Amino acid sequence: MGKRIQISLSLYDMMSSYVHDHYDPEDSWRYRRIIKGIEEKQETQMRHNAYSVYKTSRDPEEKEAARSKYLDSVGMKNSFRW
């Protein structure tokens, strides 16, 4: 993969639903690559949302839950957390 661009969330949602609904068995390698990219983007978006909640929340319980979710998603072991 080369350069990257940003797209709107609504466009991304439309593209991912289109790809999931229009599977072409003749083009399975490209389909798997697209699905992998979509799943990576969804994971990145989830991590971003958890980090944003952790940084902006005023509720300590919600903040800690978001922090824990973020650290779990990046693979941080419990022994390295403070």
Image: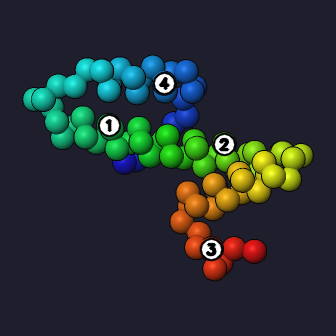
Q: Are marks 3 and 1 in contact (CB under 8 Å)?
A: no
CA gap between label 4 and label 1 equals 13 Å
Give the residue pinned by disc 4: 13
- Tell me what residue is drawn at x 57 percent, y 25 percent: 8
Mark 3 residue type: Asn
CA gap between label 3 and label 1 equals 33 Å
Q: Count neighbours of disc 3 (C-alpha within 10 A) and say few if under 14, some if 14 to 19, many if 20 or more.
A: few
Q: Earlier in the sequence, mark 3 or mark 4?
A: 4
Mark 1 residue type: Ile
CA gap between label 2 and label 4 equals 16 Å
Give the residue pinned by disc 2: 49
Give the residue pinned by disc 3: 78
- Tell me what residue is drawn at x 51 percent, y 36 percent: 5
Where in the figure is residue 52, as x and y percent of width and height? 74, 45
Say which mark, if any, is on residue 8: none
Counting every numbered tag in the picture gives 4
CA gap between label 2 and label 1 equals 23 Å
Mark 2 residue type: Asn
Q: Earlier in the sequence, mark 3 or mark 1?
A: 1
Image height check: is 38 above or below 59?
A: above
Where in the figure is residue 71, as x and y percent of width and height? 63, 62
Give the residue pinned by disc 1: 34
Q: Are marks 3 and 4 in contact (CB under 8 Å)?
A: no
